[in-house]
Image (cartoon, rainbow, N blue to C red):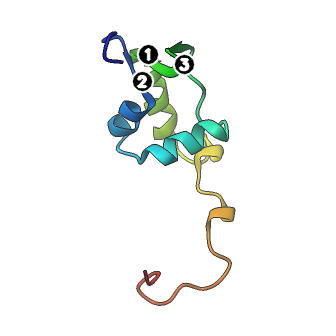
Amino acid sequence: MANDPGFITTGQLAVELQEPLWRVQHWLATKRLPEPRHRLAGKRAWSVEEVAEVKRLLSLPVEVAPELAPSDAMRPSYPLPPGGPVC
C-alpha cells in the first residue's frame, strides 16, 4: 500500500504474479489462494512472506496442488474450430 512499503495490494500482487486481477480475485473467492492476514483501510494487504507463499503455491505441480489446475467447468462443452475460438 502506498503508506506502508511492507504490504502490497491485490492489484500489485496480480502484477507481481503476471496474472490478470480478475483471476487472482477468482482464486481468492474460490479459496484456491488463502486470504492475507492483514487488511488496511478495508483492503487486502499482502506481506512479503504471503507473496512468497502465493508464488510457492502457484509453482507446485498439479499433482501436489490439484485445486490450482484449470477445471473442466472452464472448458467449453463444444469443439472449438481449428485455430481456436473466433472473436
- Image spot of residue 49 (x, y percent): 43, 16
Q: Residues within 10 Å of mark 3 (few under 14, many from 20)?
A: few
Res. 32 visible in picture = no
Q: What's under tag 3, amino acid-wise?
A: Gly
Residue at 41% over, 85% down: 83
| Badge 1 or badge 3: first in the primary sequence | 3
Tell me the residue that label 3 is attached to: 42
Q: Residues within 10 Å of mark 2 (few under 14, many from 20)?
A: few
Would you place residue 44 above or below residue 23 in this image?
A: above
Q: Are marks 1 and 2 in contact (CB under 8 Å)?
A: yes
- Image spot of residue 21 (x, y percent): 44, 43
Which mark, by number, is residue 67? none
Secondary structure state at the residue bearing disc 3 = loop
Residue sitting farthest toward the front = 41
Position of residue 32 in the picture relative to residue 84 (left or right): right
Residue at 32% over, 10% down: 3
Q: What's under tag 2, amino acid-wise?
A: Ala
Tell me the residue that label 1 is attached to: 49
Which mark, by number, is residue 52? 2
